[in-house]
Amino acid sequence: MPIVDLTLPLQSSPAEDAWGGQARLVNCYAVPLERGKSEVVIHATDGLAPLATITGAGGIRAMAAVTEAEGLVVAGRVVERIDTSGTATLVGALPSDGHVGIAQNADGEVALVCDGLYYSYVSGVLTQLSDPDLPPPLSVCSLKGYFVYMLADGRMFASDLNDFEVEGLSYAQNEQAPDGGVVGWVRGNDLLGGGKRSIEVWQINPGAEAGTFPFAPVTTIIEPATQQTIGVLSADSAIDGVFVASDKTVKLLDGYSAVTISPPALNRAIADDPSPSSISATRWSSRGYTFYAFSGTGWTWVYNATTKAWHEQQSYGLDRWRVSKVMDLGGTLIAGHYNAGTLYTLDHDTHTEDGDPHVMDVYSIPVADVARRMRHGEVVLDVVPGTISGTDRHVELAWSDMGEPFGHEMLRSLGALAQTRHQIRFQRLGSSHNRTYRIRMSAGGRRALYGAKLDLAQMGRT
């Protein structure tokens, strides 16, 4: 029988119906391999090592690095200062559960906003502020030394330079559409005023009079396919030039055009989410790759901005990743649990999630022939061999025929430490018109899949 490549996906993109294909990468991502044995390699994502637990706190709602050695964490309603060793110190509390915005100005001072209340964090002290010239804000960001507060009516108030207070006339409003405010955020030198149906771009105005808004409008973001304006769906989903848009897609700002980058399966997840305004995003960089994770009620999708591909992230026993936020603190990636006051380090050399299995699943492109049945003689995997002495690690092959649930699980050993001649073969696999294979690895240790071969032959018309 002929030997063919078992085609593996470069990103997650399952069809709406399982019959159409279930190509997915879960807890793993594909990257190009230059001058290697294959064109790509699929790596397991980084694991989670325990760091600290904030006693009596709820899920991690926001995190931000203040210095290389100090970060702020909002866990439930408490605000904690944390260092790279995981030592947490209580600095205050927030009385509500809405979106938390954190921004830092050029002097290193930090502003926090939550549900119309706003605070300063200076020299380790959290202080609630009150300014008669500033109505209750929704969010805060910082650009060129100014804090910019977004209001529900769409107005943006700017603080004095390197200060928290605002002047009564130091505000502006999105001019394209009177659609209210969702969030203000920063991309490079751009201040982005995000409303429900529009996003306006502002930049510093050197000629602004003292006491007035120090930014001038530049343009309005356009969706290039329709030439229409686009808004922001969730305040917590806008980060850098990436955001969940009001049309329930994920968009990337290409100049001042909002280009859709989300695959159809993610668009469906956003559209079906029971709480779309609660979708959150977080960003981190690791080993040359920059990731943006978007999490909804029961899903997490991750965009690798370096490879421009998506994968899914799921924690053991959950439909989503347990992480809500990630921050880089002095080169250490600290991750927070979405519904518990637990902090981890996001670590390439950790192969579990706080001791729980970190399951890597690769779902193949369907092997299909509408007219004839195909006999599947053997699957051979090219997998990194055993990397841990004394540990018996396995890989599992399962398959789904005609879109049915996965079954027929078969286990094979990955071999002993550095046993490079060990081959992983699965035989006597039956036949099918339409089959998707699932390759699963969960045992601790480095995991990477370089490819797979399939011994395949046509049968008669049945």
Image (cartoon, rainbow, N blue to C red):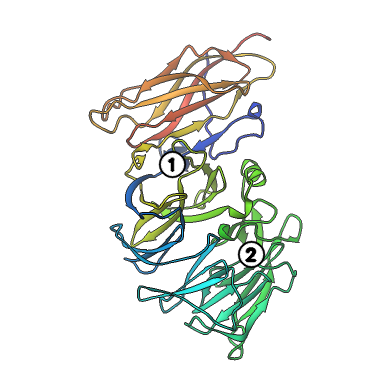
In the rendered structure, the answer to whether residue 166 lies left or right of residue 284 reads right
Residue located at (55% from left, 43% from top): 299
Residue 437, label in figure: none
Q: Residues within 10 Å of mark 2 (few under 14, many from 20)?
A: many
Quadrant in which residue 18 is drawn: top right
Query: Three-letter amino acid code at disc 1?
Result: Leu
Q: Position of residue 67 (x, y in %)?
A: 36, 69
**Badge 2 amino acid:** Val
Relative to 109, residue 41 above or below: above
Labels 2, 1: front one: 2
Residue 111: x and y in percent read 47, 73
* Count of picture labels: 2
Where disc 1 sits, the SS reads loop
The answer for how far apart the CA atoms under marks 2 and 1 are is 41 Å
Q: Is residue 105 left or right of residue 15?
A: left
User: What residue is drawn where x is 70% and y is 65%?
Assistant: 198
Q: Label 1 crowding class (10 Å Cα cut-off): few <14, some 14-19, many 20+?
A: few
Against 457, residue 446 (above or below) is below
User: 285 left or right of 177?
Assistant: left
Q: Is residue 220 left or right of residue 60?
A: right
User: In what element is the residue under mark 2?
Assistant: loop
Q: Is residue 67 above or below residue 43?
A: below
Instruction: Identify the residue at image location x=51%, y=42%.
Output: 320
Image coordinates of residue 33 in percent, x first then y, are 43, 41
What numbered label is drawn on residue 182? 2
Q: Earlier in the sequence, mark 2 or mark 1?
A: 1
| Residue shown at the point (44%, 36%) measured from the top left | 316
Observer-nearest residue: 143 or 376? Answer: 143
Q: Which residue is mark 1?
A: 33
